[in-house]
Amino acid sequence: MIDNDKLRQFITTSFNDPELDELCFDYYRPVKDEFTIGMTKSQKVMALIDYCKSRGILAHLLVTLGELRPTFPEQFDLVPTQQVGDQTTVRDSNRIFVSYANQDAAFARRLADDLHRNGFDVWMAPESIEPGEKWVDAIERGLETSGIFVLVITPHAANSKWVRDESNYAIAQQNEGKMRFFTLYVAEATLPPMWSVRQHIPFRGDYDEGLRQLLAALRPERFTARLATPTLRTPPTSAMEPSARKSLYWALGIVALLAAALLVWQWMANSRGVEYRNEVAGAIRPIERGGVDVEQVFVPAGSFMMGSEAGASDEQPVHEVTLDAFWIDRTEVTNAQFELFVSETGFQTTAEQEGGGYIYTNNGWSYTEGADWRHPQGPSSNLNGLGQHPVVLVSWDDATAFCAWAGGRLPSEAEWEYAARGPDSLVYPWGDVFDGTRLNYCDRNCPFDWADQAVDDGYEFTAPAETYSSGASWIGALDMTGNVWEWVNDWYESGYYGKSPDVNPSGPASGEHKVLRGGAWSDYYDDARASYRIDFRPVDRLNFVGFRCAQE
């Protein structure tokens, strides 16, 4: 047991003031950061000892003192300890580096303990610093050997140079594909620009829910099992008794006959013009449009919580909505599909009738003459290679006309959100944690200041309609977030959720603007939340707006 008074006296007499500052700067950076003008050397020594005791690293201090003052071990009857040698720099994809401000140590320790219990190796200063290892050397080692970076966001962290430096390193490593980066929003703070453009996992009100979301992001495979198709497992044939094997063959034969009968019944129903409806969520049916089959997915009747308490004011209040069953297009309407409609009907879009639409140029969003669905980037552009991309520069009126021609309609806002979020009211179509690989949003190819430099999906503007299969919603609908905003049928009213019917709501009776949902290639990822709403006039047409159709 070390005598605290003797230890304090040794440090006080063995180090002058500049040497003590250097000791803390090199080995105990949080202590040095707390030194203020006017602190006496005795106060600094006590701050150092108290810090090491409170963090359980007093033994580290003893090793450091032995390295810097060779007489120390003899005076305290300690066995001399060799200096720290070279540490491994092999990166472990399962090791998490926790970056936090010293004032948030209690939260960081709790988080580290929970991550340990869930099977992760956690690197966190000062606990992971080896005895006698300098602070900067240790931090560099921790960053170089960790495959995951978790940033604890608080006002203290936002003001910490060391936390910012650590996060800048992690961002660079993420851009090179060497590290995954997660931010935990623990307390409201004014954030540096590179933090503010990231999707934060909320820890402010409910620690347990925040931890659940973090674990889901770290190991998404554990949280997608409920969406997987069950697999029938049978023991190896050699291990089965003859009678059991015979029963199995009979059972499989009966299943095959039933499946064949079902297919025949479906064909007969379709041949008679009777709509075949499979009541399984996500069932796919082909429908004919202009001589070409297009796929729709089935959305069964059900209820969900519409809106978001964490969203904008027009997403509130969260309220339960119950809907009848319906079908919805599996993808956004493509240029190829819209071409069939125009060829058959001679339809002219709003942009074609009025001579232009809104596109992004070097001067920002601007009205451009000659911009229309055939010329999505202005009059000099065309649709070469874009047949399977979603049609853009279509107004609400254009979308409504197409869906009527196709034998359907635009989905209601509630139907659209239910198809995207499902009965679990997920934040995104795939789950509750943002994943930039599952959608086309404003990544490093995007021409905006808020582009996420950590993701490269290969598309500056729209992407083909079936590119992001991993971003499918619970019923298999694609691009329910990202690629293009989608018109829905409802008029927009900011306070509508406060008076919306509980069953099959269809929006306000009238209005000036129509609702759009889903985010686009041009958007910051917060707009990708499936509850997020925007609105435009029915005649507006922009090159990040498209649509999909629904049917009863």
Image (cartoon, helix red, strand yellow):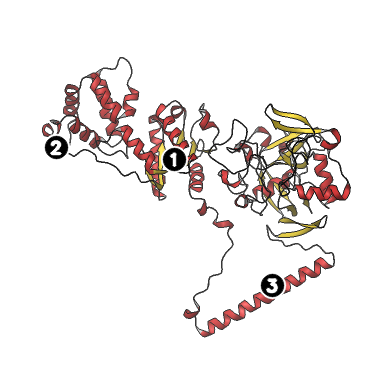
User: Do residues under tags 2 and 3 come within 8 Å of each other at their CB atoms?
Assistant: no
Horizontal side of 177 relative to 257 (left or right) equals left
210 vs 19, nearest the viewer: 19
x, y percent for residue 16:
21, 20
Outermost residue toward the right?
346
Type of amino acid at the residue the image marks with label 2: Leu
SS at mark 1 in the image:
strand
- For marks 2 and 3 on the same chain, the one whose residue lies earlier in the sequence: 2
Type of amino acid at the residue the image marks with label 1: Phe
SS at mark 2 in the image:
loop
Residue for badge 1: 149
283 vs 40, nearest the viewer: 283
Picture quadrant where residue 309 is located: top right
- For marks 1 and 3 on the same chain, the one whose residue lies earlier in the sequence: 1
The quadrant of the image that shows the C terminus is: bottom right
Residue for badge 2: 78
